[in-house]
Image (cartoon, rainbow, N blue to C red):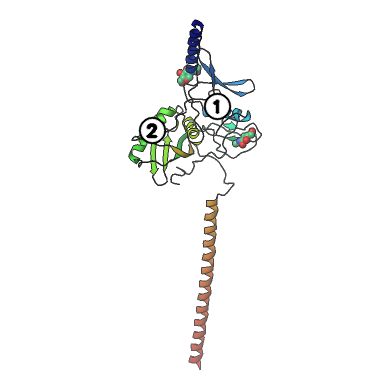
Amino acid sequence: MKTLVFLLVVAFAVGASAQQCQCKTMKWATCDGNPCECFHPVGTGERQALNCTNLIPKCILMKVEMYRSRAGMSVRGNIGGKPVETAFVDNDGIYDPDCESNGLFKAKQCNGTEECWCVNSAGVRRTDKADKDLKCEELVETHWVRIELKHKETTGAVDPAQLKTAIGNAIQERYQLDKAFVTDIEYDKDARLIVVDVKKAVGDRKADLSRMAYYMEKDVKVLPLFMDTKKFEPNVAGQKLEFDNILVYYVDEKAPTFTMKRLTGGVIAVIVVVALAVIAGLVVLFLARRRERAKYEKTQVRELDEIQQALS
Ligand SMILES: *[C@@H]1O[C@H](CO)[C@@H](O)[C@H](O)[C@H]1NC(C)=O
Ligand SMILES: *[C@@H]1O[C@H](CO)[C@@H](O)[C@H](O)[C@H]1NC(C)=O
């Protein structure tokens, strides 16, 4: 009986300490020791140490995800629009990134291949793909993200006046980013679309918008990266909002340098309309000219007749 009690106490103590040594911001991490240290493998015999006090840098998260998908482990289960012409979305998705030791992205990324491109501080491609001699002079900072969130049906109406506070508070609590960075909110109740602008000053290198956006994308699209299984659910005057969809636009301190290789449907439509208008214009001009000439010829004939009459 005594031993049983002893064992129970030990088991409880181990359980309690194990519960304390865990990674709140990264559910796949392995943690142990005293002081508690957490890591995740990123290659054979290669461990990535994780500081679970903060959100994990996006570059390191992507490395971990690539490792997990290679190893066959689980990874992932309009109003608004571009805020400025230079904004862009992430069309590439995940790749195996090169990170600095502090977790920042290296400016040039090659995904372990001969094909390389330059990224911004959120790790999103901002140039065309090129060969491995490509030069990326600096890591260009993303200073503005526009997040378009589509919320699920709600029972009551959503009060737009309360949205900014609610979203700001939820972001600050969950993603450790000061709500002062949430500068603007727009709401379209019919589309159930909330457009959230998160902006920092140009030159600010302290706040990291990419982590917040990435954790939020995972929360909405797949499953949370956090240990706890709570959701991102802003509370708008007592009503919790859940989301179906998220789209993130990135605005960098310097405009991206994509070339227009592929014409999008919209651009093609515009070109077709312009071409048709030009053709229509030419036809009208041609017909007008012909009519004018006909009139001129007729008057000439009449004048000649008059002259002949006068002469005769
Ligand atoms: C983790 O980050 C916190 C806050 O930035 C810092 O105070 C702490 O020293 C870091 N821990 C380690 C082990 O680097
Ligand atoms: C990176 O490489 C992986 C295969 O290793 C591929 O599935 C993925 O699409 C690549 N990503 C990019 C952005 O090239």
- Amino acid type indicated by mark 1: Ile
Q: Secondary structure at mark 1?
A: helix
Residue at image mark 1: 60
| Residue at 49% in and 11% down | 8
Question: How many neighbours does mark 1 have within 10 angstroms: few (below 14), some (14-19), or many (20 or more)?
Answer: many
Instruction: Say which of 144 and 257 sits in front.
Output: 144
Q: Residues within 10 Å of mark 2 (few under 14, many from 20)?
A: many
**In x, y percent, where is residue 93?**
56, 36
- Asked whether 120 or 216 is in front, the reply is 216
Give the residue at the far top of this rendering. 2
Q: Residue furthest bottom?
A: 312
Q: Identify the residue at the far front of this view.
A: 1
Q: Is residue 272 positioned above or below 82 on the image?
A: below
Q: Is residue 193 left or right of residue 162?
A: right
Q: Position of residue 66 (x, y in %)?
A: 60, 30
Front residue of 55/130: it is 55
Where is residue 167 shown, x and y percent of the image?
39, 34
| Mark 2 within 8 Å of ligand 1, using the beta carbon | no
Which amino acid type corresponds to the residue marked 2 in the rendered image?
Gly
Mark positioned earlier in the residue sequence (2 or 1) = 1
Indicate the quadrant where residue 115 lies: top right
Q: Is residue 264 above or below residue 304?
A: above
Name the residue: 51% across, 82% down.
Answer: 298
Expressed as whole percent of the image width and height from the top left, the position of residue 264 reads 55, 49
Q: Is residue 19 visible?
A: yes
Residue that appears at 53% across and 15% down = 32
Q: Residue at x 34, y 37 (%)?
A: 162
What residue did someone put label 2 on? 168
